Amino acid sequence: MNDRTSNERSALVRLAREQIGRSRGDWRWGAALGLFMLAFCGFLFGVSLTERPSVVDAGLFTKAYYSLGLFVVGGLDIGTPTGGPLAGRVMLWIAYFGAPVLTASAVIEAVARIISPRPWQLRRIRNHVVVVGTVPLVDNYLRALRRRAPRTPVVVVDEQIEPVRRQELEQEFNVTVVTGDITHDFLIRALRLHRARRVVLLGHGDFQSYEAASRMLAQYPRLQSRIVLRCHNLRFIRALQETAIARQCVTFNSYHLAASGLVRDHLIDHFRRTDLPDVVVIAGFGRFGQTVLEEMQDHARREISTLALIDIDATRRVLVAEEQRRIDGSYRKEVLEGDISHPEVWRRLEASVDLAESSPTVILGTGNIEENLRAALWIKRKYPNALVFSRTTDISRLALEVGAEHGINYFSIRQLVEEHIPDDWLE
């Protein structure tokens, strides 16, 4: 399915939801009109009332008045239907029961809306943080925020939230969960963003996040520099980095946070301990591998003598990175295209790079956690002198145990992100 078809389908789904939402409020008007007509027709057919027998001879306005009165007091003041044809009495009895029930349901719903915790909290909320999205990264941000500011009001917004996920967020992090499309102006106003401390956009859609930020800033210019926006697509965030919306927001990619943490906390000290420039192997040159290289070039460019890049699409990705000037060091560069599970890739690497010399750094950063683990064990057995890093997505007890046993450094992307969230994002 192409993007255009997907967008059209999403638009139709949103339109259908809006129509359904409107129809839920409209049905009472139709029911009220129907019950009114039943009562009015019953009076027109000649049905009388035990406490108001004169209604039979009354005018149309009087009959209409009594018909409307059924919605307020039912038949308590005017008595019950009597006389007239059976059909008229049946219609009037239906109105007698239906009108008070309809009124009561509307009153109950109104009261429920007034005392509902979410609307009440949003009406009085201030100095709060709005987090958009329910992806796992949201948990990392909320944990860091609660350690820093346990009492700060937080509102989490997403278009669709499973009941279990909603309960988890509410109980685990003490937040208010709201369901809705953050690009809708009504929801933006309902979130009281003029009183918000910060907005953190962590949803799946990159374009939707930028669109939401644009709409928020148009309504509330004071949010400038208070909107933190995560962009999943590296090329997209680079393409928009010179735009006004990017300058008014704090934009980031989660891999950047993880990569900067890995380089600053682990790699730089290792490079400084070695006497000569180092050999660095990055196996997996996707978003994470590219950001690791960017961080090394920013903070340890002179510490690298040889850089080997391994990826199943290595040639194209290196060309893209060079086009965007993300690879510009004077070190020797080796590009090997292939899967890290294929022995031939490592044979070609061994033919061009001596991993047995000094203490090379090998970073296994592919999205295949099992292959990272297998390759890390193989490399460490063959080259015990190597400093091996292996990536996992979340914290893995298995990876930590295997790493401690075999001298492999395992790192979790989500843990690195959580540990390196800037302090000013939590204030």
Image (cartoon, rainbow, N blue to C red):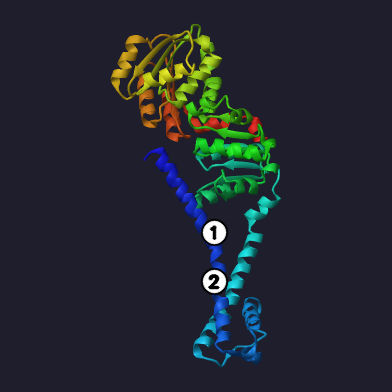
Q: Earlier in the sequence, mark 2 or mark 1?
A: 1
Q: Residue 80 location, x and y as percent?
A: 60, 88
Let me know if residue 421 appears in the view. no
Residue 230 pos. (x, y %): 55, 33
Q: Image point 70% across, 36% down: which residue? A: 222
Residue 381, by quadrant, is: top left
**The C terminus sits in image quarter:** top right
Q: Residues within 10 Å of mark 2 (few under 14, many from 20)?
A: some
Q: Amino acid at mark 1?
A: Arg
- In the rendered picture of this protein, how many numbered marks are placed on residues? 2
- Vertical arrangement, residue 377 with respect to residue 347, above or below: below
Q: Which residue is mark 1?
A: 22
Residue that appears at 52% across and 15% down: 297
Residue 301 in the image: x percent, y percent?
A: 52, 12
Please report the residue visible at 55 percent of the width from the left and 82 percent of the height from the top: 41
Q: Looking at this view, is 298 or 238 the one in front?
A: 238
Of 273 and 327, which appears nearest the observer? Answer: 327
Q: Which residue is mark 2?
A: 31
SS of the residue under disc 1: helix
Q: Is residue 292 left or right of residue 188?
A: left
- Left or right: where 32 falls relative to 5: right
Determine whether label 2 and label 1 are within 8 Å by CB. Answer: no
Q: Residue at x 38, y 28 (%)?
A: 373
* Residue 7 position in % (x across, y down): 44, 42
The Cα–Cα distance between marks 2 and 1, rounded to whole angstroms, is 15 Å
Kind of residue at badge 2? Ala
